[in-house]
Amino acid sequence: MKLFRWQGVLAFALIGGLVGVFLILFLDGMIKRGIEEKGSMAAKTQIDIASLSTSLFAQSVALTGIEVANPDNNMENLLQFENLSLDLDGAQAISRKIIIDELQAHGIRLNQKRTQPAELPDGVESTQRSKQENSANQTGLPGLGGLDGLSMKSPEEILKSEKLETLEAGNRAKKVIDDLKAKWENKFATDLNPNALEETKKKLAELQNKVKGGNLADIPNALKEFQTLQKDIQSQIDRITSMKSELEKDVQMAKQQVAELKNLPQKDFERLKNKYSMNPEGGKNILGSMLEGPLKEKLDKAWKAYKMISPYLNRGKSPEEQEYVRGKGIDISFAKASPYPDFLLRHGDLSLILFNTEVKGEVKDLSDNQKVYGKPAQMNFHSSKNEVFNSFALDVMMDKTGPQSQDKLVLDVQGLSLKNTGTQELKGGSAAVTGQLTITDENNLNGNFKAALDNVSLSIPEQKGNELANTIAQSLSTIDRINISVGISGTIENYQLDIKSNLSEIISKAIKNVIGDKMKGFESSLMSAIQSQTGDVLSGADGSLSGLLGQNKTLNDSGSAYDGLLGQAQGGADGLGKSKGLPSLPGGFKLPF
Protein backbone atom coordinates (compact mmCIF):
# COMPACT_ATOMS: atom_id res chain seq x y z
CA MET A 1 0.00 0.00 0.00
CA LYS A 2 1.36 3.39 -1.01
CA LEU A 3 1.40 6.06 1.64
CA PHE A 4 1.82 8.89 -0.89
CA ARG A 5 0.58 9.44 -4.30
CA TRP A 6 3.75 10.86 -5.71
CA GLN A 7 2.03 12.20 -8.75
CA GLY A 8 -0.12 14.44 -6.53
CA VAL A 9 2.82 15.49 -4.38
CA LEU A 10 4.84 16.42 -7.43
CA ALA A 11 1.89 18.33 -8.92
CA PHE A 12 1.40 20.21 -5.66
CA ALA A 13 5.11 21.00 -5.40
CA LEU A 14 5.17 22.15 -8.99
CA ILE A 15 2.17 24.43 -8.56
CA GLY A 16 3.56 25.77 -5.29
CA GLY A 17 6.91 26.41 -6.91
CA LEU A 18 5.28 28.24 -9.81
CA VAL A 19 3.25 30.38 -7.39
CA GLY A 20 6.40 31.11 -5.39
CA VAL A 21 8.37 32.06 -8.50
CA PHE A 22 5.46 34.24 -9.66
CA LEU A 23 5.34 36.04 -6.32
CA ILE A 24 9.09 36.52 -6.27
CA LEU A 25 9.19 37.85 -9.81
CA PHE A 26 5.96 39.84 -10.10
CA LEU A 27 4.40 40.56 -6.66
CA ASP A 28 6.56 43.58 -5.86
CA GLY A 29 5.93 45.11 -9.26
CA MET A 30 2.19 44.58 -8.98
CA ILE A 31 2.08 46.22 -5.53
CA LYS A 32 4.26 49.09 -6.75
CA ARG A 33 2.03 49.79 -9.74
CA GLY A 34 -1.08 49.48 -7.60
CA ILE A 35 0.20 52.02 -5.08
CA GLU A 36 1.23 54.43 -7.85
CA GLU A 37 -2.07 54.16 -9.72
CA LYS A 38 -4.52 54.01 -6.82
CA GLY A 39 -2.51 56.48 -4.73
CA SER A 40 -2.35 58.95 -7.60
CA MET A 41 -6.11 58.77 -8.10
CA ALA A 42 -6.79 59.20 -4.39
CA ALA A 43 -4.33 62.12 -4.00
CA LYS A 44 -5.30 63.59 -7.41
CA THR A 45 -1.65 64.01 -8.29
CA GLN A 46 1.17 61.83 -9.60
CA ILE A 47 2.90 59.49 -7.12
CA ASP A 48 6.13 57.77 -8.16
CA ILE A 49 8.05 54.95 -6.44
CA ALA A 50 11.58 54.10 -7.58
CA SER A 51 11.54 50.60 -6.08
CA LEU A 52 9.50 48.38 -3.78
CA SER A 53 10.33 45.08 -2.14
CA THR A 54 8.29 42.87 0.17
CA SER A 55 9.09 40.13 2.64
CA LEU A 56 6.17 37.84 3.35
CA PHE A 57 8.02 36.01 6.11
CA ALA A 58 9.08 39.23 7.88
CA GLN A 59 5.76 40.87 7.01
CA SER A 60 7.52 44.03 5.88
CA VAL A 61 7.65 46.38 2.89
CA ALA A 62 10.55 48.61 1.84
CA LEU A 63 10.20 51.49 -0.65
CA THR A 64 12.73 53.95 -2.06
CA GLY A 65 12.49 57.15 -4.08
CA ILE A 66 8.90 58.10 -3.25
CA GLU A 67 7.73 61.34 -4.86
CA VAL A 68 4.34 63.08 -4.47
CA ALA A 69 3.92 65.81 -7.10
CA ASN A 70 2.48 69.24 -6.36
CA PRO A 71 -1.00 69.36 -8.00
CA ASP A 72 -0.51 73.06 -8.73
CA ASN A 73 3.01 72.83 -10.15
CA ASN A 74 4.02 69.86 -12.27
CA MET A 75 7.73 70.67 -11.89
CA GLU A 76 7.70 70.41 -8.10
CA ASN A 77 7.30 67.62 -5.57
CA LEU A 78 5.10 68.50 -2.65
CA LEU A 79 6.68 65.66 -0.63
CA GLN A 80 9.37 63.09 -1.22
CA PHE A 81 11.12 60.29 0.73
CA GLU A 82 14.52 58.77 0.15
CA ASN A 83 13.40 55.49 1.70
CA LEU A 84 10.45 54.12 3.62
CA SER A 85 10.06 50.77 5.39
CA LEU A 86 7.00 49.25 7.07
CA ASP A 87 6.54 46.39 9.53
CA LEU A 88 2.98 45.08 9.14
CA ASP A 89 0.68 43.15 11.46
CA GLY A 90 -0.05 40.18 9.25
CA ALA A 91 -2.82 38.83 11.47
CA GLN A 92 -4.88 41.97 10.95
CA ALA A 93 -4.33 41.84 7.18
CA ILE A 94 -6.67 38.84 7.09
CA SER A 95 -9.42 41.20 8.37
CA ARG A 96 -8.62 43.63 5.53
CA LYS A 97 -7.00 46.04 7.95
CA ILE A 98 -3.65 47.73 7.38
CA ILE A 99 -1.91 47.85 10.73
CA ILE A 100 1.66 49.14 10.69
CA ASP A 101 3.53 48.36 13.87
CA GLU A 102 6.66 50.31 12.98
CA LEU A 103 7.61 52.72 10.20
CA GLN A 104 10.98 54.16 9.22
CA ALA A 105 10.90 57.20 6.91
CA HIS A 106 14.17 58.92 6.08
CA GLY A 107 15.21 61.74 3.80
CA ILE A 108 11.85 63.53 3.89
CA ARG A 109 11.97 66.72 1.80
CA LEU A 110 9.36 69.34 0.99
CA ASN A 111 8.82 71.39 -2.19
CA GLN A 112 11.66 69.92 -4.23
CA LYS A 113 12.15 70.42 -7.98
CA ARG A 114 11.32 67.49 -10.26
CA THR A 115 13.51 66.29 -13.09
CA GLN A 116 10.46 65.49 -15.27
CA PRO A 117 7.01 67.15 -15.39
CA ALA A 118 4.33 65.31 -13.44
CA GLU A 119 1.21 64.07 -15.19
CA LEU A 120 -2.21 64.24 -13.61
CA PRO A 121 -4.23 61.02 -13.28
CA ASP A 122 -7.02 60.45 -15.80
CA GLY A 123 -10.19 62.32 -14.94
CA VAL A 124 -8.47 64.88 -12.68
CA GLU A 125 -8.92 68.47 -13.83
CA SER A 126 -5.71 70.44 -14.15
CA THR A 127 -5.17 73.40 -11.82
CA GLN A 128 -1.45 73.66 -12.45
CA ARG A 129 0.20 76.99 -12.96
CA SER A 130 3.76 77.98 -13.61
CA LYS A 131 5.71 79.30 -10.64
CA GLN A 132 8.85 80.13 -12.54
CA GLU A 133 7.70 83.55 -13.69
CA ASN A 134 6.57 84.48 -10.19
CA SER A 135 9.85 83.29 -8.73
CA ALA A 136 11.77 85.43 -11.17
CA ASN A 137 9.82 88.49 -10.12
CA GLN A 138 10.47 88.12 -6.38
CA THR A 139 13.52 89.13 -4.44
CA GLY A 140 13.40 85.90 -2.49
CA LEU A 141 13.51 87.54 0.93
CA PRO A 142 12.17 85.24 3.64
CA GLY A 143 8.60 86.38 4.00
CA LEU A 144 9.28 89.52 1.93
CA GLY A 145 7.92 89.83 -1.58
CA GLY A 146 9.80 91.66 -4.31
CA LEU A 147 9.95 95.41 -4.62
CA ASP A 148 9.50 95.09 -8.37
CA GLY A 149 6.64 97.19 -9.65
CA LEU A 150 6.49 99.15 -6.39
CA SER A 151 5.49 102.46 -7.93
CA MET A 152 2.58 104.84 -7.78
CA LYS A 153 -0.42 103.92 -9.93
CA SER A 154 -2.15 106.62 -11.94
CA PRO A 155 -5.70 107.61 -10.93
CA GLU A 156 -6.98 106.15 -14.22
CA GLU A 157 -5.38 102.77 -13.44
CA ILE A 158 -6.78 102.84 -9.92
CA LEU A 159 -10.34 103.58 -11.04
CA LYS A 160 -10.25 100.75 -13.58
CA SER A 161 -9.77 98.20 -10.82
CA GLU A 162 -11.71 99.82 -7.96
CA LYS A 163 -15.44 100.20 -7.42
CA LEU A 164 -16.62 103.65 -6.37
CA GLU A 165 -19.24 103.74 -3.65
CA THR A 166 -20.48 107.03 -5.13
CA LEU A 167 -21.41 105.37 -8.41
CA GLU A 168 -23.24 102.49 -6.78
CA ALA A 169 -25.07 104.68 -4.25
CA GLY A 170 -25.84 107.31 -6.92
CA ASN A 171 -27.40 104.77 -9.24
CA ARG A 172 -29.42 103.32 -6.36
CA ALA A 173 -30.63 106.78 -5.29
CA LYS A 174 -31.59 107.73 -8.84
CA LYS A 175 -33.59 104.53 -9.24
CA VAL A 176 -35.40 105.11 -5.92
CA ILE A 177 -36.28 108.70 -6.86
CA ASP A 178 -37.32 107.73 -10.39
CA ASP A 179 -39.57 105.05 -8.90
CA LEU A 180 -41.13 107.65 -6.59
CA LYS A 181 -41.71 110.00 -9.50
CA ALA A 182 -43.38 107.19 -11.49
CA LYS A 183 -45.52 106.39 -8.45
CA TRP A 184 -46.79 109.96 -8.23
CA GLU A 185 -47.37 110.28 -11.94
CA ASN A 186 -49.53 107.16 -11.68
CA LYS A 187 -51.36 108.60 -8.66
CA PHE A 188 -52.04 111.83 -10.52
CA ALA A 189 -53.40 109.89 -13.48
CA THR A 190 -55.85 107.95 -11.25
CA ASP A 191 -56.57 109.91 -8.05
CA LEU A 192 -56.01 113.36 -9.54
CA ASN A 193 -57.43 112.95 -13.01
CA PRO A 194 -57.36 116.31 -14.89
CA ASN A 195 -60.69 115.35 -16.50
CA ALA A 196 -62.31 115.36 -13.04
CA LEU A 197 -61.42 119.05 -12.61
CA GLU A 198 -62.92 119.92 -15.99
CA GLU A 199 -66.06 117.96 -15.17
CA THR A 200 -66.41 119.83 -11.86
CA LYS A 201 -66.03 123.17 -13.68
CA LYS A 202 -68.68 122.07 -16.18
CA LYS A 203 -71.13 121.05 -13.43
CA LEU A 204 -70.66 124.35 -11.66
CA ALA A 205 -71.26 126.32 -14.88
CA GLU A 206 -74.39 124.32 -15.67
CA LEU A 207 -75.70 124.92 -12.14
CA GLN A 208 -75.02 128.63 -12.37
CA ASN A 209 -76.85 128.82 -15.73
CA LYS A 210 -79.73 126.86 -14.29
CA VAL A 211 -80.48 129.35 -11.50
CA LYS A 212 -80.15 132.43 -13.74
CA GLY A 213 -83.79 131.98 -14.92
CA GLY A 214 -85.01 133.07 -11.51
CA ASN A 215 -87.75 130.42 -11.30
CA LEU A 216 -88.62 130.19 -7.59
CA ALA A 217 -89.65 126.54 -7.92
CA ASP A 218 -86.10 125.57 -9.03
CA ILE A 219 -84.40 127.12 -5.99
CA PRO A 220 -84.71 124.12 -3.58
CA ASN A 221 -83.28 121.70 -6.14
CA ALA A 222 -80.55 124.16 -7.06
CA LEU A 223 -79.55 124.56 -3.44
CA LYS A 224 -79.30 120.76 -3.02
CA GLU A 225 -77.15 120.51 -6.12
CA PHE A 226 -74.90 123.31 -4.85
CA GLN A 227 -74.57 121.46 -1.53
CA THR A 228 -73.68 118.16 -3.26
CA LEU A 229 -71.17 119.93 -5.50
CA GLN A 230 -69.55 121.64 -2.50
CA LYS A 231 -69.14 118.27 -0.77
CA ASP A 232 -67.55 116.77 -3.89
CA ILE A 233 -65.17 119.70 -4.20
CA GLN A 234 -64.29 119.60 -0.49
CA SER A 235 -63.66 115.83 -0.73
CA GLN A 236 -61.24 116.41 -3.59
CA ILE A 237 -59.50 119.17 -1.63
CA ASP A 238 -59.11 116.81 1.36
CA ARG A 239 -57.67 114.16 -0.95
CA ILE A 240 -55.17 116.67 -2.34
CA THR A 241 -54.19 117.72 1.20
CA SER A 242 -53.54 114.07 2.13
CA MET A 243 -51.53 113.53 -1.05
CA LYS A 244 -49.47 116.63 -0.25
CA SER A 245 -48.57 115.16 3.13
CA GLU A 246 -47.56 111.82 1.58
CA LEU A 247 -45.60 113.52 -1.19
CA GLU A 248 -43.75 115.64 1.35
CA LYS A 249 -42.54 112.48 3.12
CA ASP A 250 -41.31 110.99 -0.17
CA VAL A 251 -39.61 114.26 -1.09
CA GLN A 252 -37.81 114.41 2.26
CA MET A 253 -36.58 110.82 1.81
CA ALA A 254 -35.33 111.64 -1.69
CA LYS A 255 -33.62 114.80 -0.46
CA GLN A 256 -31.90 112.77 2.27
CA GLN A 257 -30.55 110.28 -0.29
CA VAL A 258 -29.25 113.05 -2.53
CA ALA A 259 -27.71 114.84 0.47
CA GLU A 260 -25.87 111.65 1.46
CA LEU A 261 -24.38 111.42 -2.03
CA LYS A 262 -22.63 114.75 -1.62
CA ASN A 263 -20.07 113.28 0.84
CA LEU A 264 -19.42 110.02 -1.00
CA PRO A 265 -16.84 111.33 -3.52
CA GLN A 266 -14.72 112.53 -0.60
CA LYS A 267 -15.19 109.19 1.13
CA ASP A 268 -14.08 107.34 -2.02
CA PHE A 269 -11.12 109.67 -2.30
CA GLU A 270 -9.97 109.06 1.28
CA ARG A 271 -10.30 105.29 0.89
CA LEU A 272 -8.34 105.14 -2.37
CA LYS A 273 -5.78 107.64 -1.17
CA ASN A 274 -5.04 105.56 1.92
CA LYS A 275 -4.81 102.40 -0.17
CA TYR A 276 -2.67 103.66 -3.05
CA SER A 277 -1.08 106.84 -1.81
CA MET A 278 2.63 106.61 -1.04
CA ASN A 279 2.30 108.89 1.95
CA PRO A 280 4.19 108.28 5.20
CA GLU A 281 1.16 106.46 6.58
CA GLY A 282 1.23 104.13 3.58
CA GLY A 283 4.19 102.14 4.89
CA LYS A 284 1.89 99.54 6.42
CA ASN A 285 0.07 99.08 3.10
CA ILE A 286 3.35 98.59 1.22
CA LEU A 287 4.61 96.17 3.86
CA GLY A 288 1.37 94.21 3.55
CA SER A 289 1.77 93.96 -0.23
CA MET A 290 5.40 92.87 0.18
CA LEU A 291 4.68 90.16 2.73
CA GLU A 292 1.17 88.96 1.99
CA GLY A 293 1.75 87.52 -1.50
CA PRO A 294 4.69 85.25 -0.63
CA LEU A 295 3.10 84.21 2.67
CA LYS A 296 -0.20 83.31 1.02
CA GLU A 297 1.61 81.31 -1.62
CA LYS A 298 3.25 79.17 1.06
CA LEU A 299 0.06 78.90 3.11
CA ASP A 300 -1.97 77.88 0.07
CA LYS A 301 0.47 75.00 -0.44
CA ALA A 302 0.01 73.99 3.19
CA TRP A 303 -3.81 74.11 2.93
CA LYS A 304 -3.64 72.03 -0.24
CA ALA A 305 -1.59 69.33 1.51
CA TYR A 306 -3.83 69.48 4.59
CA LYS A 307 -7.02 69.04 2.55
CA MET A 308 -5.37 66.16 0.69
CA ILE A 309 -4.48 64.30 3.89
CA SER A 310 -7.26 65.22 6.30
CA PRO A 311 -10.15 63.19 4.79
CA TYR A 312 -8.13 59.98 5.14
CA LEU A 313 -7.70 60.59 8.86
CA ASN A 314 -11.38 61.08 9.56
CA ARG A 315 -13.16 58.55 7.41
CA GLY A 316 -15.14 56.54 9.93
CA LYS A 317 -17.70 56.96 12.64
CA SER A 318 -18.27 55.34 16.01
CA PRO A 319 -20.14 52.05 15.80
CA GLU A 320 -23.83 52.79 16.19
CA GLU A 321 -26.15 50.74 18.36
CA GLN A 322 -28.54 48.54 16.37
CA GLU A 323 -32.24 49.10 16.76
CA TYR A 324 -33.98 46.06 18.18
CA VAL A 325 -36.78 44.67 15.98
CA ARG A 326 -38.98 42.06 17.61
CA GLY A 327 -38.68 38.67 15.99
CA LYS A 328 -35.48 39.49 14.11
CA GLY A 329 -32.95 39.88 16.88
CA ILE A 330 -29.69 41.82 16.67
CA ASP A 331 -26.05 41.04 15.99
CA ILE A 332 -23.90 41.05 19.10
CA SER A 333 -20.15 41.59 18.72
CA PHE A 334 -17.74 40.37 21.35
CA ALA A 335 -15.95 43.16 23.18
CA LYS A 336 -12.53 43.90 21.77
CA ALA A 337 -9.65 44.74 24.04
CA SER A 338 -8.33 47.17 21.47
CA PRO A 339 -10.60 47.92 18.49
CA TYR A 340 -8.78 48.61 15.23
CA PRO A 341 -9.66 51.04 12.47
CA ASP A 342 -9.10 50.08 8.83
CA PHE A 343 -5.71 51.83 8.87
CA LEU A 344 -3.36 52.36 11.80
CA LEU A 345 0.25 53.38 12.18
CA ARG A 346 1.27 52.69 15.73
CA HIS A 347 4.69 54.32 15.64
CA GLY A 348 7.14 55.68 13.14
CA ASP A 349 10.60 57.25 13.18
CA LEU A 350 11.00 60.18 10.80
CA SER A 351 13.91 62.12 9.37
CA LEU A 352 13.18 65.53 7.81
CA ILE A 353 15.76 67.39 5.72
CA LEU A 354 15.39 71.10 6.50
CA PHE A 355 17.92 73.66 5.21
CA ASN A 356 20.12 70.68 4.27
CA THR A 357 20.11 69.58 7.91
CA GLU A 358 18.53 66.43 9.31
CA VAL A 359 15.80 66.91 11.92
CA LYS A 360 14.56 63.72 13.55
CA GLY A 361 11.00 63.13 14.65
CA GLU A 362 8.34 60.56 15.25
CA VAL A 363 4.70 59.87 14.48
CA LYS A 364 2.31 57.72 16.48
CA ASP A 365 -1.33 56.64 16.60
CA LEU A 366 -2.03 57.74 13.02
CA SER A 367 -5.36 56.16 12.01
CA ASP A 368 -8.26 56.70 9.64
CA ASN A 369 -10.88 56.45 12.40
CA GLN A 370 -9.89 58.06 15.68
CA LYS A 371 -13.38 57.62 17.14
CA VAL A 372 -12.89 53.85 16.96
CA TYR A 373 -9.24 53.87 18.00
CA GLY A 374 -9.79 56.50 20.69
CA LYS A 375 -6.45 58.31 20.33
CA PRO A 376 -5.44 61.46 18.43
CA ALA A 377 -2.59 61.33 15.93
CA GLN A 378 0.66 62.99 17.00
CA MET A 379 3.78 64.01 15.11
CA ASN A 380 6.79 65.94 16.32
CA PHE A 381 10.22 67.00 15.13
CA HIS A 382 12.92 68.11 17.53
CA SER A 383 16.56 69.01 17.11
CA SER A 384 19.25 70.42 19.36
CA LYS A 385 21.95 72.89 18.36
CA ASN A 386 23.64 72.46 15.00
CA GLU A 387 25.01 74.58 12.16
CA VAL A 388 21.58 75.87 11.14
CA PHE A 389 19.76 76.58 14.41
CA ASN A 390 20.20 76.43 18.16
CA SER A 391 16.97 74.45 18.60
CA PHE A 392 14.03 73.32 16.53
CA ALA A 393 10.64 72.03 17.72
CA LEU A 394 7.55 71.30 15.66
CA ASP A 395 4.63 69.53 17.35
CA VAL A 396 1.44 68.55 15.54
CA MET A 397 -1.67 66.97 17.03
CA MET A 398 -4.67 65.95 14.93
CA ASP A 399 -7.53 65.23 17.32
CA LYS A 400 -10.70 63.88 15.72
CA THR A 401 -11.85 61.78 18.65
CA GLY A 402 -14.65 64.15 19.69
CA PRO A 403 -17.66 65.61 17.92
CA GLN A 404 -15.56 68.60 16.85
CA SER A 405 -12.16 67.95 15.31
CA GLN A 406 -9.27 70.11 16.42
CA ASP A 407 -5.85 70.04 14.80
CA LYS A 408 -3.03 72.03 16.34
CA LEU A 409 0.47 72.97 15.24
CA VAL A 410 3.08 74.54 17.54
CA LEU A 411 6.40 75.84 16.20
CA ASP A 412 9.46 77.04 18.11
CA VAL A 413 12.72 77.74 16.26
CA GLN A 414 15.58 79.51 18.01
CA GLY A 415 18.84 80.81 16.58
CA LEU A 416 18.06 80.08 12.91
CA SER A 417 21.11 81.10 10.87
CA LEU A 418 19.79 83.27 8.03
CA LYS A 419 22.85 82.85 5.85
CA ASN A 420 22.07 79.13 5.59
CA THR A 421 18.50 79.63 4.35
CA GLY A 422 19.57 79.86 0.71
CA THR A 423 18.33 83.44 0.25
CA GLN A 424 20.89 85.56 -1.56
CA GLU A 425 19.60 88.88 -0.13
CA LEU A 426 20.34 87.74 3.43
CA LYS A 427 24.04 88.00 4.13
CA GLY A 428 23.87 87.24 7.85
CA GLY A 429 21.90 87.32 11.07
CA SER A 430 19.75 84.94 13.07
CA ALA A 431 16.05 84.50 13.65
CA ALA A 432 13.68 83.19 16.30
CA VAL A 433 10.31 81.99 15.00
CA THR A 434 7.48 80.96 17.31
CA GLY A 435 3.76 80.46 16.91
CA GLN A 436 0.78 78.17 16.91
CA LEU A 437 -2.12 77.40 14.58
CA THR A 438 -5.41 75.71 15.42
CA ILE A 439 -7.77 74.32 12.77
CA THR A 440 -11.26 73.52 14.05
CA ASP A 441 -13.61 71.27 12.08
CA GLU A 442 -10.91 71.01 9.38
CA ASN A 443 -11.79 74.53 8.19
CA ASN A 444 -11.75 77.34 10.80
CA LEU A 445 -8.35 78.94 11.36
CA ASN A 446 -6.93 80.72 14.39
CA GLY A 447 -3.21 81.31 14.65
CA ASN A 448 -0.42 83.72 15.35
CA PHE A 449 3.28 83.58 14.47
CA LYS A 450 6.14 85.87 15.41
CA ALA A 451 9.59 86.25 13.92
CA ALA A 452 12.45 88.24 15.46
CA LEU A 453 15.48 88.74 13.21
CA ASP A 454 18.72 89.97 14.84
CA ASN A 455 21.98 91.21 13.35
CA VAL A 456 20.34 91.18 9.92
CA SER A 457 22.38 92.10 6.87
CA LEU A 458 20.26 92.74 3.78
CA SER A 459 21.49 93.30 0.24
CA ILE A 460 18.67 94.00 -2.24
CA PRO A 461 19.57 94.44 -5.94
CA GLU A 462 18.93 97.85 -7.47
CA GLN A 463 15.94 98.22 -9.77
CA LYS A 464 16.57 100.52 -12.70
CA GLY A 465 14.10 103.40 -13.00
CA ASN A 466 12.21 102.62 -9.78
CA GLU A 467 13.22 105.40 -7.41
CA LEU A 468 10.76 104.45 -4.69
CA ALA A 469 11.70 100.75 -4.63
CA ASN A 470 15.42 101.57 -4.55
CA THR A 471 14.98 104.06 -1.70
CA ILE A 472 13.01 101.52 0.35
CA ALA A 473 15.61 98.84 -0.40
CA GLN A 474 18.38 101.18 0.70
CA SER A 475 16.53 101.97 3.94
CA LEU A 476 16.03 98.26 4.64
CA SER A 477 19.71 97.58 4.08
CA THR A 478 20.61 99.82 7.05
CA ILE A 479 18.57 97.97 9.68
CA ASP A 480 19.86 95.11 11.84
CA ARG A 481 16.69 94.01 13.65
CA ILE A 482 13.28 93.09 12.24
CA ASN A 483 10.17 92.07 14.17
CA ILE A 484 7.21 90.59 12.29
CA SER A 485 3.95 89.16 13.61
CA VAL A 486 1.31 87.46 11.46
CA GLY A 487 -2.21 86.69 12.65
CA ILE A 488 -4.26 84.11 10.72
CA SER A 489 -8.06 83.97 10.91
CA GLY A 490 -11.07 82.96 8.84
CA THR A 491 -11.47 79.71 6.93
CA ILE A 492 -9.15 77.72 4.70
CA GLU A 493 -11.01 78.94 1.61
CA ASN A 494 -11.23 82.54 2.81
CA TYR A 495 -8.57 83.48 5.34
CA GLN A 496 -7.12 86.83 6.38
CA LEU A 497 -3.60 87.80 7.42
CA ASP A 498 -2.96 90.55 9.96
CA ILE A 499 0.67 91.59 9.44
CA LYS A 500 2.52 93.92 11.80
CA SER A 501 6.20 94.91 11.82
CA ASN A 502 8.66 97.60 12.75
CA LEU A 503 9.39 97.76 9.02
CA SER A 504 6.27 99.90 8.59
CA GLU A 505 7.94 102.90 10.20
CA ILE A 506 11.14 102.40 8.21
CA ILE A 507 9.24 102.20 4.93
CA SER A 508 7.14 105.25 5.86
CA LYS A 509 10.27 107.35 6.39
CA ALA A 510 11.66 106.20 3.05
CA ILE A 511 8.42 107.17 1.32
CA LYS A 512 8.47 110.59 2.93
CA ASN A 513 11.97 111.25 1.62
CA VAL A 514 11.12 110.19 -1.91
CA ILE A 515 7.61 111.43 -2.47
CA GLY A 516 7.51 114.96 -1.10
CA ASP A 517 5.44 117.21 -3.36
CA LYS A 518 4.58 114.34 -5.74
CA MET A 519 1.79 113.28 -3.43
CA LYS A 520 -0.03 116.62 -3.73
CA GLY A 521 -0.28 116.21 -7.48
CA PHE A 522 -1.37 112.58 -7.12
CA GLU A 523 -4.12 113.44 -4.65
CA SER A 524 -5.36 116.34 -6.79
CA SER A 525 -5.47 114.12 -9.90
CA LEU A 526 -7.21 111.33 -8.01
CA MET A 527 -9.93 113.68 -6.73
CA SER A 528 -10.44 115.13 -10.22
CA ALA A 529 -10.71 111.63 -11.70
CA ILE A 530 -13.29 110.62 -9.10
CA GLN A 531 -15.33 113.78 -9.68
CA SER A 532 -15.19 113.26 -13.44
CA GLN A 533 -16.38 109.67 -13.16
CA THR A 534 -19.15 110.39 -10.65
CA GLY A 535 -20.37 113.76 -11.99
CA ASP A 536 -22.99 112.32 -14.35
CA VAL A 537 -24.42 110.05 -11.66
CA LEU A 538 -24.71 112.90 -9.15
CA SER A 539 -26.27 115.18 -11.77
CA GLY A 540 -28.70 112.41 -12.69
CA ALA A 541 -29.78 112.03 -9.06
CA ASP A 542 -30.25 115.81 -8.77
CA GLY A 543 -32.30 115.81 -11.98
CA SER A 544 -34.50 113.02 -10.70
CA LEU A 545 -35.05 114.95 -7.46
CA SER A 546 -36.04 118.07 -9.42
CA GLY A 547 -38.55 115.99 -11.34
CA LEU A 548 -40.04 114.71 -8.12
CA LEU A 549 -40.20 118.23 -6.67
CA GLY A 550 -42.12 119.26 -9.79
CA GLN A 551 -44.97 117.04 -8.64
CA ASN A 552 -45.56 119.56 -5.84
CA LYS A 553 -46.54 122.17 -8.40
CA THR A 554 -49.10 119.80 -9.90
CA LEU A 555 -50.70 119.26 -6.50
CA ASN A 556 -50.61 122.97 -5.62
CA ASP A 557 -52.17 123.95 -8.94
CA SER A 558 -54.90 121.37 -8.52
CA GLY A 559 -55.51 122.46 -4.93
CA SER A 560 -55.77 126.11 -5.94
CA ALA A 561 -58.17 125.27 -8.77
CA TYR A 562 -60.48 123.31 -6.48
CA ASP A 563 -60.30 126.05 -3.82
CA GLY A 564 -61.47 128.51 -6.47
CA LEU A 565 -64.31 126.26 -7.55
CA LEU A 566 -65.39 125.80 -3.94
CA GLY A 567 -65.50 129.58 -3.49
CA GLN A 568 -67.56 129.98 -6.65
CA ALA A 569 -69.99 127.29 -5.56
CA GLN A 570 -70.42 128.91 -2.13
CA GLY A 571 -70.77 132.37 -3.67
CA GLY A 572 -73.33 131.23 -6.22
CA ALA A 573 -75.52 129.62 -3.60
CA ASP A 574 -75.16 132.63 -1.32
CA GLY A 575 -76.14 135.00 -4.12
CA LEU A 576 -79.10 132.86 -5.02
CA GLY A 577 -80.43 133.04 -1.47
CA LYS A 578 -80.06 136.83 -1.21
CA SER A 579 -81.81 137.44 -4.50
CA LYS A 580 -84.92 135.72 -3.17
CA GLY A 581 -84.82 137.27 0.27
CA LEU A 582 -84.47 133.95 1.97
CA PRO A 583 -82.92 133.36 5.38
CA SER A 584 -79.30 132.27 5.21
CA LEU A 585 -78.15 128.76 5.88
CA PRO A 586 -74.74 127.81 7.16
CA GLY A 587 -72.33 128.04 4.34
CA GLY A 588 -74.27 130.85 2.65
CA PHE A 589 -77.33 128.86 1.54
CA LYS A 590 -80.93 130.34 1.66
CA LEU A 591 -84.18 128.57 2.36
CA PRO A 592 -87.15 129.31 0.09
CA PHE A 593 -89.60 130.26 2.89
Image: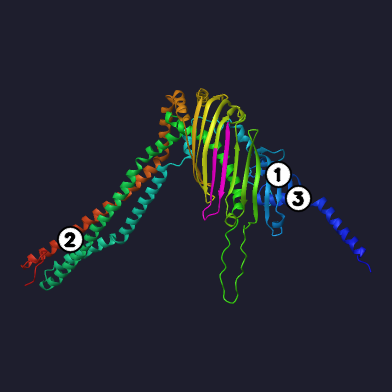
Q: Tag 1: residue type?
A: Leu
Q: Position of residue 121 (x, y in %)?
A: 69, 49
The rendered magenta stretch, by its main secondary structure, is classed as strand
Gap between marks 2 and 1 measured at Cα: 105 Å
Q: Tag 3: residue type?
A: Ala
| Residue 153 can be seen, yes or no | no
Front residue (pair 274, 336): 336
In this view, the mark in front (3 or 1): 3
| Residue 570 can be seen, yes or no | yes
Q: Secondary structure at mark 3?
A: loop
Q: Residue at x 83, y 56 (%)?
A: 19
Number of the label disc, if any, that sits on residue 585: none
Q: Residue at x 11, y 74 (%)?
A: 217
Q: Is residue 33 above or below residue 329?
A: above
Q: Secondary structure at mark 2?
A: helix
What residue range appears in magenta? 390-411
Q: Is residue 335 above or below residue 460?
A: below
Q: Residue at x 45, y 28 (%)?
A: 505
Number of the label disc, if any, that sits on residue 58: 3
* Residue assigned mark 1: 84
Is 401 a magenta residue? yes
Number of the label disc, if any, that sits on residue 566: 2
